Amino acid sequence: MPSFSRHDVLLVRYPFSDLTNSKVRPAVVVGREFRGDLLIVPLTSRIGSLGAGEFVLSDWRAAGLNVPSAVKRGIYTVHGSIVLKAVGQLPTADSSRLDASLRVWLELV
């Protein structure tokens, strides 16, 4: 399994909740779990109405994305086997903003 780093932008095959199918979506690595699992935060191209701590990436092209994208609130554990590929890495400004959002979401501040 490839090794991924914090703030890598990945394409992940997200399963539907009923496990009948899946859809490829972008996500950002926020941590490593045990035995090949990754902690990820989802990205979305729906940038219209964002909640607390969610934000539009300032440089989505540098992150390897094709369209303007936003960080969505949510932390998911996925096995590395459902990662299709790494497409880029968050620039420093967006990485810092994501870290600040994580602290707020997890009530660490």
Image (tube, grey):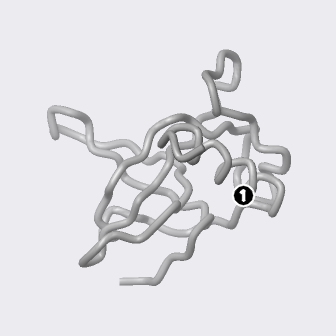
Front residue of 37/100: it is: 100
The residue sitting at 60% across, 61% down in the picture is 9
* Quarter of the image where the N terminus is located: bottom left
In the image, what residue type sits under mark 1?
A: Ser
User: Taking 82 as reference, is 52 left or right?
Assistant: right
Q: Residues within 10 Å of mark 1 (few under 14, many from 20)?
A: some
Q: Quadrant of residue 89?
A: bottom right
Front residue of 103/1: it is: 103
Front residue of 16/92: it is: 92
Q: Which residue lies furthest to the front in this view?
A: 109
How many labels sit on residues?
1
Residue 49, position as x, y percentages in the image: 66, 16
* Quarter of the image where the C terminus is located: top right
The residue sitting at 62% across, 40% down in the picture is 71
Q: Mark 1 points at which residue?
A: 95
| 16 to 81, vertically: above or below | above
| 62 to 43, vertically: above or below | below
The residue sitting at 51% across, 40% down in the picture is 107
Residue 25, position as x, y percentages in the image: 48, 46
